[in-house]
Image (spheres, rainbow, N blue to C red):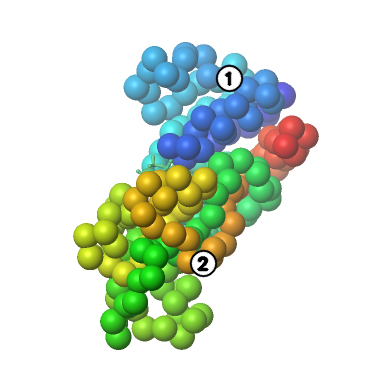
Amino acid sequence: MNLKDNIVIAISKGRILEEGMELLKTMGIETIVNMSDSRKLIYDTNNSNLKLVIVRAADVPTYVGNGAADIGIVGKDTLVEYGENNIYIPLDLNISKCRMTLAGLPGCKPGPRIKVATKYVKCATDYFMKKKKQVDIIKLYGSMELAPILGLADYIVDLVDSGITLKANGLEEIDSIFDVSAQLITNKASMKTKTESIEKIINSFEEII
Ligand code: ATP
Ligand code: MG
């Protein structure tokens, strides 16, 4: 792939990184130094005009929305939760699939004020608004499964793939809220100023998925 412009791709850390790097490899894009032996956050690739940056999931829309990165690879969960200003979503990459789920202990009977623990405050709020239910949201940053067990919350809203973690902690899925997979996003302005180079990258993603 021959790029005219300098392009920065921001990739979400965590589960998306591994599968995202596999996609890039299939497209013939590889980092110069091996990622696993490095603590770098920005990587040159075998394409001299293309750099990769590795950031926290929630930071990907911020880097891309502000044009610090031209392209991003990020979960739909993150886009729904943290908004999507100044970006386009040209392609569903169909990797890192899971779903946003409501879960709780079997037979749970919440009191008049339902308590919901989650990292996804907006997703949980919107879900219960649609159901016309008043809830108290308790913001957590990880290990949501603990909250119902310790009585911190009646329910959790979290990502689930196999459901093994839920089951291991005695929880069950109550409702599936929406399907999640990694999305390719682009900065709106970059799309105008670097059209040809960005389209080349979108097309080569499209060819391999
Ligand atoms: P953070 O520290 O911000 O929570 P993390 O490094 O723990 O990030 P992950 O939990 O791997 O990152 O989540 C990164 C992205 O991977 C999520 O935004 C989501 O799109 C996807 N993801 C999360 N959990 C799963 C799962 N169980 N199966 C598939 N994809 C998942
Ligand atoms: Mg995590």
Sequence-wise, which precedes: disc 2 or disc 1?
Answer: 1
* Mark seen at residue 30: 1
Quadrant where the N terminus sits is top right
The Cα atoms of the two marked residues, 2 and 1, are separated by 40 Å
Quadrant where the C terminus sits is top right
Q: Find out if the beta carbon at label 2 lies less than 8 Å from the nearest ligand 1 atom.
A: no
Measured as percent of width and height from the top left, residue 27 is found at 69, 25
**Residue farthest to the front, as pictured:** 107
Mark 1 Cα-neighbour bin, 10 Å: few <14, some 14–19, many ≥20:
many
Are circles 2 and 1 on residues that touch, CB within 8 Å?
no
Amino acid identity at mark 2: Asp
Report if residue 171 is visible in the image: yes
Task: Give 90 or 106, whichever is nearer the viewer.
Answer: 106
* Mark seen at residue 101: none
Task: Give 138 or 55, whichever is nearer the viewer.
Answer: 138
Q: Residue at x 47, y 15 (%)?
A: 34
Q: Quadrant of residue 86?
A: bottom right
Measured as percent of width and height from the top left, residue 17 is found at 49, 33
Mark 2, secondary structure of its residue: strand
Q: Which is more foreground, mark 2 or mark 1? A: 2
- Report the residue marked by disc 2: 175
Report if residue 200 is visible in the image: no
Q: Quadrant of residue 50?
A: top right
Q: Is residue 189 above or below residue 34?
A: below
Q: Residue at x 46, y 74 (%)?
A: 126
Split into quadrants, the picture shows ligand 1 in the one at top left
- Left or right? Give the position of 111 relative to 102: left
**Residue farthest to the right, as pictured:** 207
Q: Is residue 200 above or below residue 164?
A: above
Amino acid identity at mark 1: Glu
Q: Is residue 148 above or below residue 108?
A: above
